[in-house]
Image (cartoon, rainbow, N blue to C red):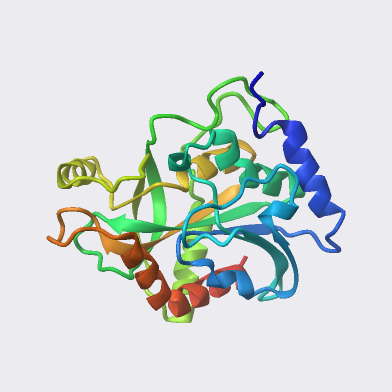
Amino acid sequence: MTTLVGTFEQVEAAAAFLRARCSRLPETAIVLGSGLGDFVDRPRQPLAFAYGELPHWPQAAVVGHAGRLVIGDVAGRQVAVLSGRAHLYEGRPLGEVVFATRVMARLGVRRMLLTNAAGGINTAFAAGALMVIDDHINLLGTNPLVGANDERFGPRFPDMTEVYSSRLRAIADEASRAAGVPVAHGVYVAVHGPSYETPAEIRYLRAIGADAVGMSTVPEAIVARHMGLDVLGISCITNMAAGVFPEPLRHEEVLETAARVRGAFIGLLEAIVERL
C-alpha cells in the first residue's frame, strides 16, 4: 500500500516538534531558492535544524539547496528561514513539495516570502535583476490541491485572484527604495523541468505574458493561499532564458549569478522583514 505524503497528521507532527522547541514562534517564513541560501545565516539567536532532524520532512537534494531550517530574529522580527526546497522534477509527490509550507502554516506563520532563481524572459531584464512576482502562470501540468481536500488545511476551491499580496508587494517596493536595491515586477511561469526550456518554448511563454521562468514556487504559493497565508514572491534573474542569447544554459551560471547578487538580495530581504 502506498503511503500518503503530507497528510494532516504528518504535517502536524512536524509542527508540534518545532512548537515544542521554540520559545518564540515565527510569524514569517522565508524560502530560499537555488544559490540564495546565505540568508540562512542572518537570524540572531538561531534555533537551527537539518531537514533530516525534522519529522517526515523531505530532504533537499539539489545543488544550491542546503537543507536547513533556522528560526531566529531578523530586524527585530521572528522568522523561519528555509534553505532548500523539494522540487517536482526530482520525481517527488506534490505532498512533499508543499510539506514545508503546510508545516509553517500550522506552526502559526502568517506570511510566506518565496524566493527562487529564474530565467529571464523579459528582454528588459539582465542577469542579476531581482523581480517581485505580481502573478504566476502554472504550467506544471498539475496542482498541489488535486485529490481529496482536507478541510483542516483549507477550502476545496480557494480563490487565487491575488496570490501575491498587493500589500506585501508595496512593502517590497518601499524596502527596495530604502535599501537602494532596485526591483522589477513581473509574471513568473512555473514549468516542470528539469531540462531547461527550448527557444521556441520561451517565445511561447513570452507570448502568453511571462517575464521569468522557473521550476518551483507556484505549488508553495497555491498551498500558502489555501491555508490563508499572505505571500510575497521574489525571483533572482540568474540567467537569460534559452534563445535570448546564443550561449547554452548551465546550472553553474545560476549559482554564480546568485552568489554575485547575494549582498543586494540579503539587504532587500532584511529591509522587507523590518517593515512587516
Q: If the image is split into quadrants, where does the N terminus sit?
A: top right
| Snapshot quadrant of residue 22 | bottom right
Residue 216, horizontal then vertical, whole percent: 45, 47
Q: Residue at x 15, y 54 (%)?
A: 243
Is residue 225 visible to us here? Answer: no
Q: Check the image and report above or below for 182 versus 89.
A: below
Query: Does 47 sit left or right of 224 as displayed?
Result: right
| Snapshot quadrant of residue 93 | top right
Residue furthest to the left in view is: 246
Q: Check the image and report above or below for 179 versus 238.
A: below
Is residue 240 visible to us here? Answer: yes
Q: Residue at x 55, y 57 (%)?
A: 84
Residue 110, horizontal then vertical, whole percent: 67, 52
Q: Residue at x 53, y 58 (%)?
A: 168
Q: Which of 238 and 180 is in front in this view?
A: 238
Q: If the image is split into quadrants, where does the C terminus sit?
A: bottom right
